[in-house]
């Protein structure tokens, strides 16, 4: 397939490198400097004790013959990116949170997909990523798509798992993001510490209980087990929100916890612990914006 990826972050670089093994890939970066760097030096992927370099074509927009456009930008960049995306047979969105789901349903594409990425990828610089753990990418149709796309995107040691419902797929990912990301960002700890420290673990369980009030199709026990499992599996990782706070970048708190608070409001459910987390992270953002 001819695949065009929008976004030169950790996920965009990783998917470009992996898909380039079996597909024709073009990558669209936000800055010209990153484009020039990648054209000259390629994408560097570090995994375990090895390092590999992959070269892909760089483009300012999707080529005319594009089968799939994959949008790998942060949730808060979608508003700027969406008006500029040309039509293609299929489009795939790889954002955290839920707030984009209603928007992308209305897009004039025949096939619209959403993904939940479960790989542990860290961006070291504008061409280098560290793979801390391979898992899978869950894929679901938002409009018109079929399981055939998951089969086409599947690669050796690069797994795609087809899900029947995009909403529930994203809710499952939202649980981990809404609990782990803001807690680790505010406490300045790695993911595993939330499971190891009894006081932090108690707070994690409170948040999982509140999450179950908003989405009662899953019990507190099920959500807690899932979130703790991710904490332990990614114990040595720093969450993306912690990295954003450390580097003074905008976080995805609105797309993750903000979306959860809106869902709770619709259902007339009180989730005070999440409200507190939201305001604390927004306060952190305000601190470094004022500097």
Image (cartoon, rainbow, N blue to C red):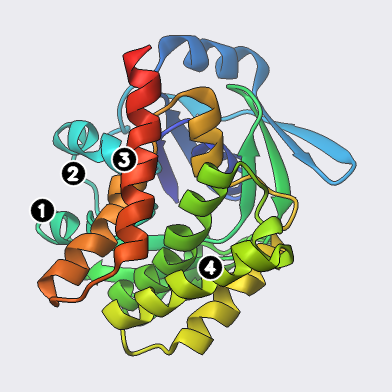
**How far apart are labels 4 and 3 at the CA level?**
47 Å
Q: Do the residues labelled 3 and 2 touch (CB within 8 Å)?
A: no
Q: Tag 4: Cα neighbours inside 10 Å, few (<14), some, or many (≥20)?
A: many
Say which residue label 4 marks.
204
Residue 87 is marked as: 2
**How far apart are labels 3 and 2 at the CA level?**
10 Å
Q: Are marks 2 and 1 in contact (CB under 8 Å)?
A: yes
Q: Residue at x 53, y 58 (%)?
A: 180
Viewer can see residue 170? yes
Q: Tag 2: Cα neighbours inside 10 Å, few (<14), some, or many (≥20)?
A: some
The single residue placed furthest to the front in the displayed view is: 199
Say which residue label 1 marks.
108
Figure check: 88 above or below 230: above
Say which residue label 3 marks.
65
Residue 184: image location, x then y, percent? 57, 49
Query: In the picture, residue 37 is in which quadrant?
Result: top right
- At numbered mark 2, what does the secondary structure look like: helix, strand or loop? loop
Q: Residue at x 62, y 12 (%)?
A: 40
Which of 193 and 161 lies nearest the eye of the viewer?
A: 193
Q: Which of marks 3 and 2 is nearer the N terminus?
A: 3
Which of 46 and 261 lies nearest the eye of the viewer?
A: 261
Residue 43: image location, x then y, percent? 64, 29
Q: Earlier in the sequence, mark 4 or mark 1?
A: 1
């Amino acid at each position: 397939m001819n695949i065009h990826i929008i976004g030169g972050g950790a996920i965009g670089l990783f998917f470009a490198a992996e898909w380039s093994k079996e597909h024709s890939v073009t990558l669209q970066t936000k800055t010209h400097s990153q484009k020039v760097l990648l054209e000259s030096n390629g994408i560097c992927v570090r995994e375990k004790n090895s390092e590999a370099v992959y070269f892909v074509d760089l483009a300012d927009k999707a080529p005319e013959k594009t089968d799939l456009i994959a949008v790998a930008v942060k949730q808060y960049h979608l508003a700027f990116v969406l008006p500029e995306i040309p039509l293609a047979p299929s489009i795939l969105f790889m954002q955290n949170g839920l707030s984009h789901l209603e928007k992308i349903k209305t897009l004039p594409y025949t096939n619209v997909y959403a993904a939940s990425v479960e790989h542990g990828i860290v961006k070291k610089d504008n061409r280098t990523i560290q793979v801390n753990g391979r898992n899978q990418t869950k894929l679901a149709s938002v409009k018109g798509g079929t399981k055939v796309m998951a089969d086409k995107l599947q690669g050796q040691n690069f797994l795609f798992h087809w899900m029947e419902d995009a909403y529930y797929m994203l809710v499952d990912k939202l649980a981990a993001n809404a609990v782990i990301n803001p807690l680790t960002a505010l406490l300045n700890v790695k993911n595993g510490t939330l499971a190891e420290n009894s006081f932090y673990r108690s707070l994690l369980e409170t948040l999982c209980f509140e999450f179950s009030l908003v989405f009662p199709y899953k019990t507190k026990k099920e959500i807690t087990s899932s979130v703790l499992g991710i904490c332990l599996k990614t114990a040595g990782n720093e969450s993306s929100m912690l990295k954003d706070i450390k580097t003074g970048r905008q976080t995805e708190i609105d797309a993750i916890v903000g979306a959860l608070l809106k869902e709770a409001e619709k259902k007339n459910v009180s989730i005070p612990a999440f409200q507190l987390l939201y305001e604390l992270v927004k306060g952190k953002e305000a601190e470094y914006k004022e500097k």
